[in-house]
Amino acid sequence: MNILAIVVAALVVGFVGLFIGFFLGISGEKFKVEVDEKESAVLEVLPGNNCGGCGYAGCSGLAAAIAKGEAPVNQCPVGGAPVAAKIGEIMGVAADEGEKKVAFVKCAGDCEKANNDYEYTGLTDCAALAFVPNGGPKTCNYGCLGGGTCVKACPFDAIHVVDGVAVVDKEACKACGKCVAACPKHLIELVPYSASHLVRCSSKDKGKDVMAACSVGCIGCHLCEKNCEYDAVHVEDNIAYIDQSKCVGCGKCAEKCPKKAII
């Protein structure tokens, strides 16, 4: 065994290791990226779901935008008012308390109330159903397909398909908007949590066609509009819309609706 060769090899390896360590240390100092302390503090406060509901690529993206003043302190829909208040303290600004919102599915046509043109067997995915005849088996071309695309998109387990129709759990919903973007029928929208009355239908067909397709569809009869004393309900394109900024929750629209499309 050549002891000298072993010693030389050990010295060479040690020298190379010291050189690399020294080089990395110098490089780290020279090329290090300065991190904004406020950005780090904001990121710690954010919930960390990385759902994208704020419009940025995860919580780190939002934290950077808030620190730069490019996004408001209440931009996170998941954290809501409590998180906005904490971020406001970090940024030294007042956090406006925006109204809490939740997702709402504008369809009540479940297996019992909605008619089908044919029986479908295949992939249970709403996006896939867009390629089958009439965009799905339901007679109503505006109705919920019940394929669960929105369920898969929700990171908070706040929406489930019940009896063929997607239903939102108001308490679990964080208004991230993932389900809104995922629904190919555009049946889901974000509404105020405090909304007392909503139209659970999206059909723009004429009344007789709606009645042939669904027992609880809006037929555009204008009775809700005529009986609203606060000008909060209007029928457009054969479907009733409720202006939540005017609605006082009196319930007359729901009471007069012959199809019980307003809940």
Image (cartoon, grey):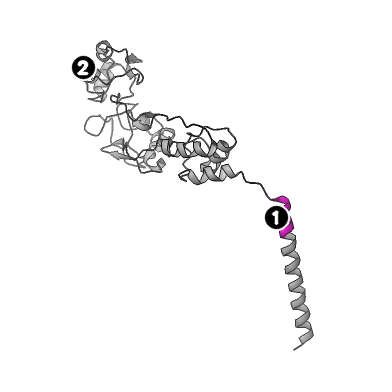
Q: Residue at x 47, y 32 (%)?
A: 95
Residue closer to the observer: 209 or 96: 96
Q: Amino acid at mark 2?
A: Lys
Q: Where is 245 relative to 4, above or below?
A: above
Q: Which mark is residue 242?
A: none
Asked if the magenta segment contains residue 27, the reply would be yes
Q: Pinpoint residue 127: horizontal percent, then vertical percent.
A: 41, 36
Q: Is residue 26 left or right of residue 217?
A: right
Q: Of label 1 and label 2, which has the lower sequence position?
A: 1
Q: Which residue is mark 2?
A: 256
Asked if the magenta segment contains residue 197, the reply would be no
Q: Pinpoint residue 199: horizontal percent, then vertical percent.
A: 30, 23
Q: Main secondary structure of the magenta part?
A: helix
Q: Amino acid at mark 1?
A: Gly
Q: Residue at x 32, y 38 (%)?
A: 171
Q: Quadrant of the C terminus?
A: top left
Q: Pinpoint residue 4: horizontal percent, then vertical percent.
A: 79, 85
Q: Where is 150 relative to 12, above or below?
A: above
